[in-house]
Amino acid sequence: MSSSYEPVIGLEIHVQLRTRTKMFCGCELSFGDPPNVHCCPVCLGLPGALPVVNAAAVDFAVRIGLALGSEIAPRSLFHRKNYFYPDSPKAYQISQYDVPICSGGCLGDVRIHRVHLEEDAAKLVHIGSSGRIHGSDRSVVDFNRCGTPLVEIVTEPDLRSPEQAHEFLTVLRTTLRQLEVSDVNMEEGSLRCDANVSIRPVGSARLGTKTELKNMNSFRFLQRGIRAEIVRQQELVAAGEPVVQETLHFDPVSERLTSLRSKEEAHDYRYFPEPDLVPLLVTPEMRAAAAERVPELPTDRARRFEAELGLRPGTARDLAFRRELSDYFERAVAADAGATPVEVANWIPQLVERIGSAADPAQSRVGPEALATLAALVAAKRVSRDAGREVLTTLVAEGGDPQAIVEREGLGTLSDDDGDGLAALVDSALAADPDAAAKVAQGNMKAIGPLVGYVMRESKGRADGGEVTRLIRERLAEQV
Ligand code: ADP
Ligand code: MG
Ligand code: ZN
């Protein structure tokens, strides 16, 4: 049963914009300041106060739209979305409705439905052990957050698994970070995501009834919540029961889903055009200014690493989705030390492993030129792979020039013309294991392992495995 139904997922992502001031007033944005110190008549919703659109927020929204390949509306509208909630003093939110600032676009193979501008609500803080309003427990409101500029990014229902949703969010976060429009920090709430989930028979073009998972505060929890909801819906369908459209909360500790409310419809919000604001115009000049701030984005960079530098898709993405890694990689490639980009790329995970996965390699003692030189030495077989790893460890600890480290520590590859070094080791390997030598001489190449192993051990990893194999066969052929 479960395999004949496929999940369908669409995401709604709220992104707090990192402007200096709020969406419709001059109050400063702050995170972590004492409560209720950044508010004014506008963001407190006092009668008669008039909103003014924050130009920086519009610029950021256009930047996001351009990065996602959206259509930018030259003229869009603000609407009032009416509802009562203690963290929303006006009893409405200024948002966009039928004419959003950005429409369409995509990120990877997920289509974007729209991107619109709106304002954030205040923050309710529940005081007391239970977190509920009960007995001595209280809820208080911090209006510092009220009126923070938000964009809401809405995808088409193009995602087909919890893993794909996680992956999409990771790419989106990297992209937004690179656009420098948001802190995109889930714990601090500057990135928040709701997931819409349904299932349908495989091959069906019709969408099933969806439920909405609210405001998960980590990508992991979101992925687990979606997974749990898919299972719940599959069990309902298997039992012949309908999926009811509702909003759910996922508790990551108990893995339980509980209903928050039945789904509201757009008409419940009594949307109408915001009478205090004129239409929002995006001029060609505004568009051009935003375009200048859109750098090469992770998906494009990954594509370029594949197409122009020959990296495998996985490697290209691992590098491109972390800007500091890809910047470092590109500087190493530009050093032109004699290694191919693929060879350089292969050393980056080893460097990351040694400096810690969160560290920026540019801040380490290993300069990109040094890494490129090391990659070239190993590629040219002047240093064995094992010895190369040792050189990297030394580089991480002390910095310096790989070539000098190789010479100082005697880590260069032993080769045939290296005096008698390698040839002598091969001879002693053959002498030490005449049985294996005889088998190899008779053509049983499986027996060569211990002989190569002997040489590698005795040379302390300085010999090149391929070269050793070649020498052993050459020596045995001479004996026949
Ligand atoms: P609503 O009006 O309930 O907010 P929308 O049509 O605006 O619904 O879609 C909101 C989000 O839900 C979008 O990300 C969309 O892709 C997604 N979505 C819509 N229908 C479905 C469905 N049947 N299954 C999964 N996701 C869906
Ligand atoms: Mg919705
Ligand atoms: Zn204000």
Image (cartoon, rainbow, N blue to C red):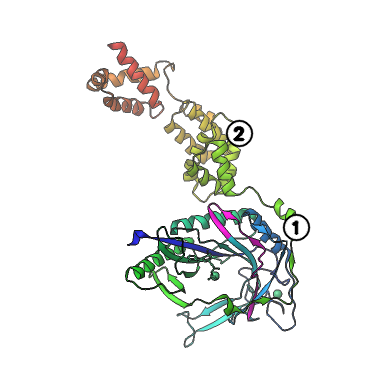
Q: Looking at the image, which is closer to me, 352 or 344?
A: 344
- Measured from the top left, where is residue 240 in percent x and y? 33, 71
Q: Looking at the image, which is closer to me, 62 or 186?
A: 62
Q: Is residue 7 visible?
A: yes
Q: Residue at x 69, y 61 (%)?
A: 73
Callout 1: few (<14), some (14-19), or many (20+) C-alpha neighbours within 10 Å?
A: some
- Measured from the top left, where is residue 57 in percent x and y? 69, 64
Q: Which structural element holds mark 2?
A: loop
Question: Which residue carries the number 1 mark?
Answer: 286
Q: Is residue 330 above or below residue 6?
A: above
Q: Residue at x 32, y 17 (%)?
A: 427
- Residue at the bottom extreme of this rendering: 135
Q: Residue at x 30, y 19 (%)?
A: 428
Q: Looking at the image, which is closer to me, 61 or 70?
A: 70
Name the mark nearer the viewer: 2 or 1. Answer: 1
- Measured from the top left, where is residue 298 in percent x and y? 58, 49
Q: Is residue 425 magenta?
A: no
In the image, what residue type sits under mark 2?
Ala
Q: Which mark is residue 335?
A: 2
- Measured from the top left, where is residue 173 in percent x and y? 56, 57
In the image, what residue type sits under mark 1?
Met
Q: Is mark 1 within 8 Å of ligand 3?
A: no
Q: Is residue 409 above or below residue 365?
A: above
Q: What is the span of residues highlighted in magenta in the rendered image?
A: 91-112
Callout 2: few (<14), some (14-19), or many (20+) C-alpha neighbours within 10 Å?
A: some
Q: Looking at the image, which is closer to me, 374 or 254?
A: 254
Q: Which structural element holds mark 1?
A: helix
What is the distance, in whole Å, between disc 2 and disc 1 at their CAs?
38 Å
From the image, which quarter does the N terminus lie in?
A: bottom left
From the image, which quarter does the C terminus lie in?
A: top left
Q: Is residue 361 visible?
A: no
